[in-house]
Image: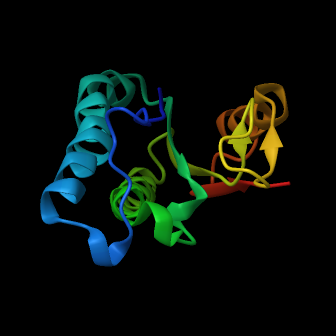
Amino acid sequence: MECSPVGTFGSTALTTPSETEPSQVQHEMEFQLYGAIAATKAVLPAMREAGAGTLLYTTGAGSIDPVPQVGNVNAAAAALRNWAINLHKELTGTGIQAAHVGIDVSIGMSVIPGFPTAQPEEISPVYWELHTTHRDEAERVFTL
C-alpha cells in the first residue's frame, strides 16, 4: 500500500505557524494522519496473515524540515511521518515493511517558483527500492 495524502489549493488553507488556527491543523490531521491510519487498518490484517507486505507513506519534506508558509500542513505531515516510523519499529521482524518517503521537490511541474522539480519516473525508484532491497529502512528522502 502506498499512501500520499495531499490536498488541493481549493481544499487546503495554507497558514504560517503564527497564523494557524487549531481547526486548520485538525483538518490536515484528519486528512493526512487519520486517513493513513484508516487505510492501514484496512490492509494490515491481511499482511499480518501473509507475513509480508509493504506500507509506504509519502509527505512533503516539510515533515522533516518545516517550511513556514505551510505550517499547518507540515504539522500534520510530521505527525504522519512520526506514526509511520513508529509503525516501522513495531513491525520489525514480521516481514512487513513500513516506511516514510519525504519528497523535497515539486512533482511534474513547478508549483513554487524556483523550487526544484522532478518527474515521477525520477522519484519512483525510491519506492521500488524500499519495497524490494531496502526493507530495513524506515525513511528515505527524495531531493535533487
In the image, taking residue 45 as reference, residue 110 lies left or right, namely right
Instruction: Say above or below: 3 vs 94.
Output: above
Image quadrant holding the C terminus, namely bottom right
Q: Residue furthest bottom?
A: 18
Between residue 31 and residue 95, name the one nearer to us.
Answer: 31
- How many discs mark residues in the rendered view? 0
Which quadrant of the figure has residue 107?
A: top right
Left/right placement of residue 65 relative to residue 105 reads: left
* Residue 137 visible here: no
Q: Nearer the viewer, residue 53 or 1?
A: 1
At x 27%, y 36%, the residue is 35
Determine the residue positioned at 48% across, 51% down. 93
The residue furthest left is 23
**For residue 7, which quarter of the picture?**
top left
Q: Position of residue 135 (x, y in %)?
A: 64, 45
Which colouring convention does the figure follow? rainbow
* Residue 47 screen position, x and y as percent: 38, 26
Which one is in front, 144 or 129?
A: 144
Position above or below: 12 against 40: below
Residue in view at x 54 percent, y 63 percent:
62
Q: Is residue 122 something that shows in the picture?
A: yes
* Image coordinates for residue 96, horizontal then vertical, percent: 48, 38
* Residue 55 percent location from the top left of the image: 47, 36
- Is residue 18 placed above or below 31 in the rendered structure? below
